[in-house]
Amino acid sequence: MNHTPPIFIHSTGHIAHRPRILIVDDVLTNVQYLLDALKEDYQVNFELSGKAGIEFAHQYRPDLILLDAMMPEMDGFSVCAQLRAHAETSAIPIIIVTSLDSPEDEARALEIGASDFMPKSVNLAVLRARVRTQLTMKRQGDMLRSLTLADPLTGLSNRRALDATIAKEWRRCARSQVPLSMILADLDHFKSFNDAYGHPAGDDCLKAVAKVFIQAAQRPQDLVARYGGEEFVILLPEVDLLGAEIVAGGVMVALKTLNMAHAASDTGSRVTTSMGVASIVPGMQAPEILLSTADTFLYRAKNLGRDQFVSGMVGV
Ligand SMILES: Nc1nc2c(ncn2[C@@H]2O[C@H](COP(=O)(O)OP(=O)(O)OP(=O)(O)O)[C@@H](O)[C@H]2O)c(=O)[nH]1
């Protein structure tokens, strides 16, 4: 089965992936009927058992699942309940497609979290319309979710997204016993920047500095977040202390190159930042220790005269 979704270039120039639909049905002729109706417009994959459908959903996160109710071993109702119970798959819309047509079955499907319910003999135009509706709602939900996780000024991840990612990466790095590092950065004398140049210029400065942080943290698993007003965090999974120091050094150099004037700074004539850099191989501690250690180092960097970073291992 080909799992790579085709890429479409919109007339606006941006690249979009064709929505991916998963069909789960143990009868191949049923799969074929749905596949023929949808393959023109969507990337369609299928699995022939509930178990395989759940595995596919976890691995590839389809945008919609068409799920047969009656299957041997694991029926569609159990599959639906399991998908709803896991955070990674709970937002995927599920349409139960079935030969059962009693109101009780329909009610049961909706109660366990199916988004819609339709008979196997459904008219193809109706099928396509219902699929479109579910995909539109999914897209809107995805957009809303990403808005609640983004900082509106800089477009970076916000604190809520950061907290969730720290918890996830902490567990992952603990499982594989690899380091997790963090850089906590706080711009120097930012209050006087606002006072000297005005709040809108302060906003522009924060946007420019956000770009510097993004450029410094290039790997796909790195996360750059706006932690507070003029505080930023770079979370670096699978990066040890030395690697995190290199990233922090890159931020210092990039800010020097940016050379944004800050005549009211007591530290120099341009915008600078102080940073705390902390690293740990996660174990039994609470994840908060990473942030609190980075904060302690940041405080030291401020006291040592700003425009520098202080780094160390957590607990050492
Ligand atoms: N323009 C702008 N300013 C902000 C924003 N969020 C926070 N600030 C400002 O950031 C400043 C932070 O000031 P302080 O916490 O005193 O820190 P500081 O002046 O940078 O001093 P040090 O950190 O000790 O070097 C405050 O004046 C806030 O108003 C924002 O979104 N836009």
Image (cartoon, rainbow, N blue to C red):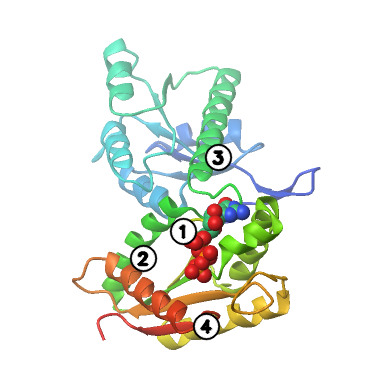
| 4 or 1: mark nearer the eye | 4
**N-terminal-most mark, 3 or 1:** 3
Determine whether, in the image, residue 188 is placed left or right of residue 173. right
Please provide percent x and percent y for residue 314: 29, 80
Left or right for 88, reference 128:
left
**Relative depth, front residue between 296 and 22:** 296
Q: Earlier in the sequence, mark 4 or mark 1?
A: 1
Q: Quadrant of ligand 1?
A: bottom right
User: Which three-letter amino acid code belongs to the residue tagged 2?
Assistant: Glu
Query: SS of the residue at dot 4?
Result: loop
Q: Which residue is mark 2?
A: 169
Residue that mark 4 sits on: 308
Rounded to the nearest angstrom, the CA distance separating label 2 from label 3 is 23 Å
Label 3: which residue? Answer: 143
Alpha carbon distance from label 4 to label 3: 38 Å
Tell me the amino acid under the disc marked 1. Answer: Tyr
| CB contact under 8 Å: marks 2 and 4 | no
Mark 4, mark 3: which one is toward the viewer? 4
